[in-house]
Image (tube, rainbow, N blue to C red):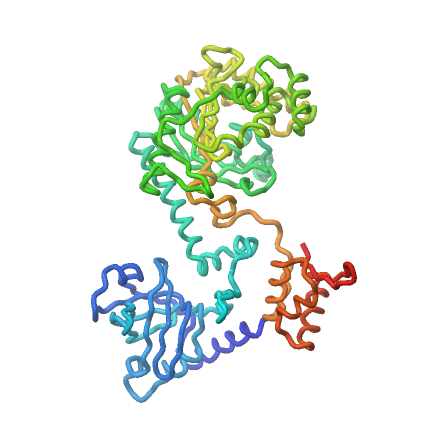
Amino acid sequence: MLSEQEQIRREKLIKLKSLGINPFPANLFPTNTNSIEIISNFTEDKAVIVAGRIMSRRIQGKASFAEIQDSKGKIQIYFNRDEICEGDDKTMYNEVYKKLLDIGDIIGIEGTLFKTQVGQKTILVKKFTLLSKSIRPIPIAKTDSEGKTYDEFSDPELRYRQRYVDLIVNPNVKETFLKRTKIINTIRNFFNNNDYLEVETPILQPIPGGASARPFITHHNALNIPLYLRIANELYLKRLIVGGFDGVYEFAKAFRNEGMDRTHNPEFTMVELYVAYKDYYWMMEMTESLLERVAIELNGSTLVSLDDKEINFKAPFKRIGILDSIKEHTGYDVSNMDENQLYDTAKELNIEVDKTMGKGKLIDEIFGEKCEHHYIQPTFITDYPKEMSPLTKEHRDNPQLTERFELLVNGKELANAYSELNDPIDQLERFEEQLKLSEKGDDEAMFIDNDFIRALEYGMPPTSGIGIGIDRLVMLFTNNSSIQEVLFFPQMKPERKGIELNEEEKNLIKFIKNNSPVELSLAKSESGLSNKKWDKTIKSLTKNKLAFVKKINDKLIIEAAE
């Protein structure tokens, strides 16, 4: 069912067409500048051609001010009836502009530049063209005389579902994604300047390898085989090192069929780099240089503000072994514990574990619960036990450990790197240990990839590899605590069937949500509705199960549904 505003806008379509105006023309509109260029390089009386979306307007008889927004920002425009309509026919101003255009419409403008009496840079409109009619009103925040703001498009779920609206009305959101692109380009340029080759590897894979995670499964009809969305691109990139490339990298979409929260999305972006004849000590230094470069390119400094903290990406970063970290933060030395002892230790530390977990997972759970959050400044956590690292070369000084590090920043993993295991016999044994974990019920254990073993048997040079989570990196550098804020279209729960609300209902449910639970009498007073409108509005909200009224201590209370 269409709202009143949507119905009115559709009626305007008909009127526009009756005037011979196509509300969705096909021909190009030849812009020659944008809002930022106009403001930065302002020249009085300069002719300009711009296009953008109407975001506000103030109609004053035969003259009006409006504001349009393009991809770069906003610029004021000035409509004068006699400038637009030089002859006796004033239809384009009196009918089209004043009555048939709306906020949200996209128009093209031809005009000249001038400054208003208060010095605001403005375009004097000589001619305008309707480029796209908006038939659904965009939510524009309004501020009343008391400074209260209404109709903000701020509900996170709505913002993530309708990112297109979010980008229109919340300019800071676009800035996040511009920074995301700059981060990716900085990393790409850094790798390219070191002569590493950017490559592409399969997303659909017969074996989901390269990480411990639960995969998404699909089916290839023509081949009649199961296929998996990749959980990592590691094993394919190492095959390319076997093939003779000295350095390869890939910005990869990966998919893991696991939970969703503020730092996890089932579809995510990472970059993985593999360089022949290097080890994890070299990779630590490379990582320091890379992230220092990203910070400087983005902020002009190695310092990054994050909530009330300041993160410094100036090299060198702190380094500590994972077993030393556990001992430091729990008092337990787990270095020589067997699986049963680790299980008991986890229980003593009140960590939720189960009997399907092997040594590696138990150590990972202890570290994650008791240590991880302490590392705010960039810190390399090094030398993981062999059970935690089935693709990593055995440590040169301690055969129980591996040459692996994770980079933690602000208590979260940002990167994972190894001296890569290139012994095919050892690698097969590690895969077989993973198979045993799978048989115990670990649905994140790695599969055996026999083709990868075959590749190693031809010989892979000593290699170091790293994977960096792009989404978390962007969160860090844009001061966002939720991964949904740095993904254009994050995965969401299925959308509930929409319930059309009128303005009174929208305002009341917003007040209830912000103050829930609230006394019914206070909600009525704040709504400003007449008794008749109040009764109709409250009945609609309770009937649609958007709000509930109950009695507590002789008071009627209303609260929003979850």
Q: Quadrant of residue 54?
A: bottom left
Q: Is residue 540 left or right of residue 447?
A: right
Q: Residue at x 60, y 58 (%)?
A: 514
Residue sitting at the far bottom:
88
Q: Is residue 86 left or right of residue 481?
A: left
Q: Residue at x 49, y 55 (%)?
A: 163
List x then y, in percent, for residue 93.
Answer: 36, 81
Q: Is residue 479 above or below residue 314?
A: below
Of the pair 335 and 201, the residue shown nearer to us:
335
Q: Is residue 108 above or below residue 234?
A: below
Of the pair 240 and 1, the residue shown nearer to us:
1
List x then y, in percent, for residue 53.
Answer: 40, 66
**From this viewpoint, is residue 481 visible?**
yes
Q: Is residue 175 above or below residue 533?
A: above
Of the pair 367 and 255, the residue shown nearer to us:
367
**So how many labels did they put on this image?**
0
List x then y, in percent, for residue 489.
Answer: 51, 50
Q: Is residue 353 left or right of residue 46?
A: right
Of the pair 123 and 205, the residue shown nearer to us:
123
Q: Residue at x 52, y 76 (%)?
A: 8
**From this viewpoint, is residue 450 visible?**
no
